[in-house]
Amino acid sequence: MPENRTNALGPLSSSRTGATGLPRIEVVDLGKSYGPVTALTGVTLSVAAGSVLAVLGHNGAGKTTLVDILATRTRPSTGSATVCGFDVTRDGHQVRRRIALTGQFASIDETLTARGNLVLVARLMGAPAKAARARADELIELFGLVEAADRVSMTFSGGMRRRLDLAACLVGSPKVLFLDEPTTGLDPVSRTGLWTTVRLLAREGTTVVLTTQYLEEADRLADDLVVLAAGAVVASGTPTELKAKVGARTAAVTFPDAWSARWALEEFTRLGLKPVLDPDAYVVTAAIPAAGQIVPLVRALDQYGVTVVDLTVTEPTLDEVYLALHRAAWDTATWEAP
Amino acid sequence: MSKPRHLRSGASKTGSSKTSSSKAGSTNAEPGDEDVVGDRTEWTGSSLRTQVWVLTTRSLRAAFGDPRLVFFGLLQPVVLLLLFSQVFSGVGSLPGVAQYQGYINYLMPATLVNIAMITAMGAGAGLVAETYSGVIGRFRSLPIATGSVLLARTFADTARLAVQLVAIVVAAVLFLDFAPYGGPLGLAAAVLLTLFVGWGLSWLFVAIATWQRSIELMQAVSFIATYPLMFSSSAYMPLQSMPAWVRAVATVNPLTYAIDAARALALGRVPGWSLPMAVGLAAVAALGGGAIAARNFRRSA
């Protein structure tokens, strides 16, 4: 068993990511309105093969609409989109041959067993009966559904449904996988499991587009992020880029006494930082633009033999990014008001 | 979640060292090659026939998977027939019915059509339920024809109807003194006609289901479509005994033609215009309902 595992994982360990830079998804000036309501407007983006794009936004920001258009479930009102080189409006069938989608709710046939669901999808994708059963067995094992394989899926827990749903998506080895809020309502164990699966898929060359409200999820999985607000892209870039835009890491150094704290304040200033002293707790806090800048800091402290009680570096979270973006949007709106 | 291993592997490799590795070798990429579904080059999509077959058997397995469901599903029309034949037994002596020598003979062919109507309603309700459960969403994201999902739905429900019709005919002959003077051939013709009418009706309810996707509304619409049509027809009473306005409604009621034709076939009488009218109306229902259903189904998300 462990031997098989090493074997199966072999080709995966060669590179960190399967991304090749070729665009798998191209979206140009995409818009969608339902009557007077604008769900999406002027969205332009490109997703490289084998990369993971996270679409972030509030409820109603247009995330699901974007995914629905790309998965050919909804037609765009304006603009164009191609998936694997095929236009989503003109070549819907070709697109559907290459993609898979899991919506916010598991799309499984509750009257069938786990195996029955997977065989059904494989058969509909054109697999002969025998190949369909083989593929079902394979996925059942991969997703830890062996014990439940022949149970009617009506009895499944939320986590098991999600797993079966994702397994059903992977039956045809899609080139692009759309996950619409895939971990909403999942327990932490199932969530981590899903993250592992997504990373593995991306490593094997599958392009993944996921929508999420969880910034941690986007941070962990995504190569690129797009933040939607009121149907428009308000920010995009890598997680690192977005974080750099908003704020820096902060280093907080705790000293045993007021003297060394005050000394550090001067020393940090000399290094070009803007430290702040909390005189009661002997803590000096400073924003550090790059991760490397912590090194001269530590070296300086070491050089003068200053005792340090504690040193913590805080990464800016995507929550801060998110809040800052929305604050900016809100501020603009307020300023523009008469 | 157990650790996913080789999510894109070709044939089942685990535990087999002899599996050809040519497929596995190509799994790790060529992301630029867009002409295949993953690495499953052999899966070039399924034919319409396969799609309809796979989807129909799926629905049938669901319908016949639970023996309790099958039992009560078959019992329901038998109970209805028993009730109507006893409660309305007095109708048997009315002019226009007396010639059938027993109300059961008059009622039974109408009951076949009644069952067809109720089963057709079930086709619509089933589609709504499956839209809610998410299965339909899955089908819509697969590279299959829109029509095959709907076609399979109506085929499965017509197959279900066939089982119900056979069961009730057997029960009526054995326990309720039903005497089909048309003989086995006439009876078979009546059942076949009813199946076709039921198939046509199922398209109407499928069309309603694709248009009105709330279960409550679906039930309300179905009720309004079903009961007045059943009672304002020649199903339970001869037209002569009805008030003039109901008789007028019954004369244009499409169900009257289906019922008259089924009755004539089963009882060895001349169906006259009722037979081509019933077949024609069912065909119109299937084509019209199918066109509306397909359009709604494709458009909606």
Image (cartoon, coloured by chain):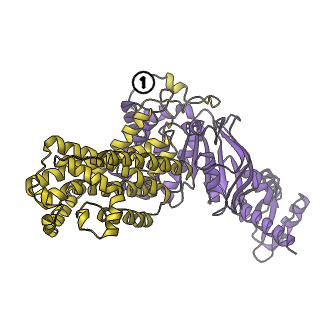
Question: In this rendering, would B109 be left or right of B132?
Answer: left
Badge 1 local density, few (<14 within 10 Å), some, or many (20+)? some
How far across and down, in percent of the image, does residue B207 sit? 45, 53
* Quadrant housing residue B11: top left
Of residue A5 and residue B142, the one placed in the foreground of this image is B142
Question: In this rendering, would A17 be left or right of B47?
Answer: right
Marker count (numbered): 1
Q: Colour of chain A?
A: purple
Of residue A204 and residue A100, the one placed in the foreground of this image is A100
- The residue under the point 27% across, 68% down is B242
**Callout 1, which amino acid?**
Thr
- The residue under the point 27% across, 50% down is B161
Q: Is residue B72 visible?
A: yes
Q: Chain of mark 1?
A: B
Q: Is residue A146 visible?
A: no
How far across and down, in percent of the image, does residue A83 sit? 64, 39
Of residue A149 and residue A106, the one placed in the foreground of this image is A106
* Quadrant housing residue A12: top right
- The residue under the point 80% across, 65% down is A328
Task: Name the element at disc 1.
Answer: loop
The vertical placement of A15 against B176, above or below, is above
Residue to which mark 1 is pinned: B19
Of residue A237 and residue B198, the one placed in the foreground of this image is B198
- The residue under the point 38% across, 55% down is B126
Residue at the outermost bottom position = A280
Q: Colour of chain B?
A: yellow
How far across and down, in percent of the image, does residue A270 sit? 91, 60
Question: In this rendering, would B64 be left or right of B53?
Answer: left
How far across and down, in percent of the image, does residue A71 sit? 59, 46
